[in-house]
Image (cartoon, rainbow, N blue to C red):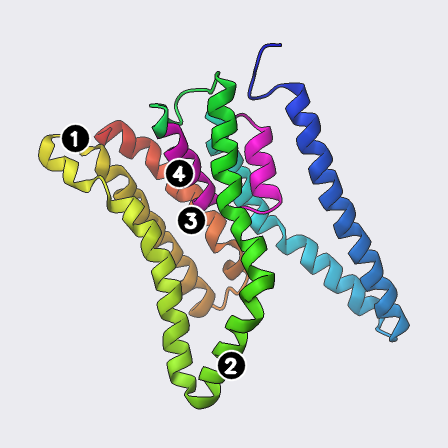
Amino acid sequence: MEFRVNHPIIFIMVGLIIAAVIAQSIFFLLRALKRAKAIGMDKEVLKRTMIKSAIFTIAPAISIVVGVIALSHSLGIPLPWLRLSVIGSLSYEMIAAERALEAFGLNFTEAITDPQVYVTVVWVMTFGIAAGLIFAPLFGKKIQNGMDKIEKSDKKWREIFSNAMFLGMISAFLGFVFCDVANVFKGDTSGLIPVVVFAFSAVIMALCGFCSIKLKQRWMNDYALPISLICGMAIAIPVTAWLG
C-alpha cells in the first residue's frame, strides 16, 4: 500500500481519537449542567455562560487552524490536526517537526513521502509534549506546595520566581528565532526572516494590549494571539520574497 500523509486510514485513526476527546468534553458538560441545576443555578446565567464560552473558543480555534495550514504541506492534515486539537502547542509542534525533518535533510516546503520519516516526526512531536502528562500528576502538587510556601514567606519573591520561569521558557523560543542571524555575515539573509516576523508580531501584540487597556476593548485579550499569528504569517510572505 502506497504511503501518503493524507491517506484515508490516517484520517480515520485521527478522527476516532478526536471523536473520543469530543465525547469526553460533552460528558463533562452534561455532568456540569446537571450539577448546576442541582445546586439551583439560574438557567439564564447558565445559558449566557455557555454562549460566551462558545464565542471565546473561536480565538484559540483560529490559532489552531493557522497551525494546521502551516504544517499541512509537509505533514498533511491529519497529524497537525491531531497534535493541535488534543494536547499541543503551535510553537512547540513547529519546532519539533522542523528539527525532525532537518535530521533527514528535509524542510516544510517538501511533502513527506517516506513512512520512516513520517513516523519519526510523529514520535518527536508526541513524545516531548507527553512528558507534561507524566510529570504533572507526579510533581505538580509538590511544585505548587513549594510555590505556596514561598508566597507565604515572601510574596514578592514568588512573583519574581514565577516570572523568571516564564521568561526562561520564552528564552528557549527566542533562541530559535535568532539562531541563524549570524549567517548574514556569510551573505545569507534568510536568518533575518524570523527576526522580522517576530518583531512585527510583537508590535501587533503590543497594539492589541494598548487597545485592550487604554481603549477598554477587553475582547482583544482573547483575540490578541490569533491576530498576531495571522499578521506574522502574512508579513512573512513579502519578507521571505525580499530576504529569502
Closer to the camera: disc 1 or disc 3?
1
- Main secondary-structure element of the magenta-colored stretch: helix
Q: Alpha carbon of mark 1 to alpha carbon of mark 3: how far?
A: 27 Å
Q: Is residue 166 left or right of residue 135?
A: left
Q: Position of residue 145 (x, y in %)?
A: 54, 78
Q: Is residue 41 left or right of residue 225?
A: right
**Three-letter amino acid code at the position of disc 2:** Asp
Magenta stretch: give its range.
76-102
Q: Alpha carbon of mark 4 to alpha carbon of mark 1: how far?
A: 21 Å
Instruction: Please say if 230 is above or below 101.
Output: below
Closer to the camera: disc 4 or disc 1?
1
Closer to the camera: disc 2 or disc 4?
2
Residue lying at the far right of the rendered structure: 38
Q: Quadrant of the N terminus?
A: top right
- Residue tagged 2: 148
Q: Between residues 207 and 130, which one lies in front from this camera angle? A: 130
Q: Are marks 4 and 3 in contact (CB under 8 Å)?
A: no
Say which mark, if any, is on residue 228. Answer: 3
